[in-house]
Amino acid sequence: MIPKYLSTIWDAIAPALANHLWQSTLFALTAGLLTLLLRQHHARARYWLWLAASVKFLVPFSWLVVLGNYLAWARAAAAPASQPGLYLVIEEISQPFTQPSVSVVSAAHPSLSLLSMLPVLIALWLCGFLAVLFVWGARWRRISAAKRTAVPLAEGREVGALRRVERVGGVRKPIELLLSQASLEPGIFGIARPVLIWPEGISKRLEDAHLEAILAHEVWHVRRRDNLFAALHMLIEALFWFYPLVWWLGARLLEERERACDEEVVELGGDRQVYAESILKVCEFCLGSPLPCVSGVSGADLKKRMVHIMTARILRKLDFTRKLVLTAAALLAIALPIAFGVVHATPGQAQSSDVTTTQPVRSFETVSIKPSTRPAGGPTQLMMNLDDGSFVARGVTLQTLIKLAYNHVQDSQLSGGPDWLNTQKYDIDAKMNAADIDDLRKLPMEQVGDQGMLKAMLRDRFQLTLHPEVRNLPVYDLVVDKNGSKLQETSGPGRMRLGKGELAAEGTPLALLTEQLSVRLDRTVVDKTGLKGNYAFNLHWTPDASEEARIKADGISEAALPPSAETSESILTAVQEQLGLKLEPKTDKVQVLVIDRAEMPSEN
C-alpha cells in the first residue's frame, strides 16, 4: 500500500512542481527583458516588474488553464450533446470490476529508488522551510523588542520635520515616531499600522536638511507599501528556499525599492549632495535592518546608490508605446494559459455539464426502487429496452448509477458521498411514457443515453446533488500501436461480456473499452486513437495480485465469475498484443464529480 500512495503523491507533485518552476522562470526572464527596455526610466516601473515575477511563484498557470477548461465545458454545454450514451445491453457485469484496481507496471510509476527518496525530499523541504521561518522570526523578534522598549515622541525637532515631510509627500495618516536605544538604522516597522523607529542620538549628528532627507525616504516607503510587498516575497523565499531564482529576485526588489525612494526624494526638491551625505551619516552611526520587510535607508548596493543619486540625469516617464507593451505583456500572461485551457480541454474528463440539478429533457414516468434481493456476489444487470420503454437494473449501487448517468465517469472521478455509495445494492424497474418512447426511437442510438432520465431519477429519488472540481490525476492515453490496430469494425446490436481477465465485445464503440480499462487500471483512460466506429474484440489477460485480492475482499467466489482464457499477459501487454493499441501513462487534469448529498430512496 505504501508504494501505491507514494506513487500517487509523486505523480501529483513532481510534474506539477517542475511545470510551475519552469513557467515561473520563463516569466521572470520575460520580466528581466522588459526591465532592460526600461533601464533609463524610473525605478518604480522596474520594481513592479520584478514584483510581478515574484508573485508569479504563488500563482500557477495551471489555475488559469483550469479556468479555460471550465470555459470550454460551458461552451460545450450550449452545443447539442454528442457524447455516446450507454445504450448497449451489458450483461454479467461482475461487481469486483466496479472497484478500483492497480496494475503493477514499471513504466507507469517512478522507480522504487525515487519513491523511497520522496519522504526524504519532503522532509528536506520542510526542514529548509522551517529554518528560513526560524531565521526570519528571530530577526523579527529583535526588531519587535526594540519597538517595545522604544518611547513614543509627540513633539520635538524630529516630529516637526516628519509632519512637514508627510504633508509634502501626501501622507494623510500621521506616522507614529518611536525613539529607540537600539543601534538599528531608522526604519519603518509594521504593515497595517507602520511606525518609524528612530535611533536615539542620531539626530545630534544630522543637520535639519539631513534629517528631513532621511524622513522623506521613510515616508515614501510608507506610501509605496514596501513592507507589505517585502513580506510577501519573504513568504515566497520560505516556500521556494531551494530555488536560487527567488533569492535573486529578492535582491532585485530591494535594489529597485531603495532606488525608487531615492528618486522620489530628489524629485521633490531634495539636494543630491545633502541626501547622499545623510545616507552615509546613517550608515556610520547605525546597523542596517536585518529584515527586508523593515524599510530603512541603507539597503541595496551603497556605492551604486551614491552614484545614482549624484548623477544628474533626466529619467524618462513611460510613453504610450511602452505602456502599451507592458499592458500587452500583462494581458498575454493571463490570456495565454486560459486560451490553452479552452483549446486543450482534456477529452477524458467528465464531459457532462449537467452536474447540477438542472431540469432534464425527459424523465421516467414510473420508477420502482427496492433493496436488491440478489445474493452477495451476484452479477449486476443493466438493460434499457426501447420496445416497451423499460429500464431494468438488478444489483446496482448508487455509484454505478452515477457513472452510468454522467457519461461513464470512472471511480477515480467520483469523490465524497455516503458510506453505502458502493455497497448498498438496489433493484430498479422504470418505464417511460409512450410519447418519450416514440421520440427516443427517432434519435440516433448514440444520443439515447444523453436524455437526462437517469439524472432526474437520481435527483428525485436519491436526492443527489454534486458539483465538479478539476484535479491532477494519473491517466492513460489510449493510442494506436506503431504496428496498427487489430480491431474489427462491425455493425449491428452492441454487446459486451465481462469476466475475470476477459473483455469480449461486438459492435461497441471504444468509449466502452476505455471505460472498462479505466476501472481495471484505477486510472482514467483517454481515447486518443481517433477510431470512431463500432468494433469487435476479445481481450484476455491474467489479473494481477491486487485484482485477485479485491475479489476476495468483496466476498465474491471466483466460481461466480466467468473463467479467463489461458494467458500470462498483463492487461497492458494484452491490449498492445491482442488489440494493436497502447496505453501510455501520464498526468493530466481530470474533472472529478464531488458528491454533496445523497440519501437512500424510499420504496415505491
Image (tube, rainbow, N blue to C red):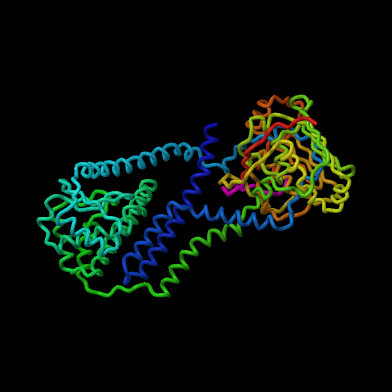
Q: Position of residue 23 (x, y in %)?
A: 46, 56
Left or right: residue 83 compared with residue 288: right
Q: Is residue 351 magenta?
A: no
From this view, report whether residue 483 is shown above or below residue 553: below
Residue situated furthest left in the rendering: 204
Figure check: 276 above or below 484: below
Q: Is residue 562 visible?
A: no
Q: Quadrant of the C terminus?
A: top right
Place of residue 19 in the rendered image (x, y in percent of width and height, measured from the top left): 48, 52
Residue 291: where, in percent of width, then height?
A: 27, 49
Task: Read off the magenta span.
Answer: 578-591
**Residue 589 falls within the magenta-colored stretch:** yes
Magenta span: chief secondary structure: strand
Q: Is residue 47 left or right of residue 472?
A: left
In this rendering, the count of numbered labels is 0
Q: Quadrant of residue 166?
A: bottom left
Comparing 342 with 79, the one in front is: 79
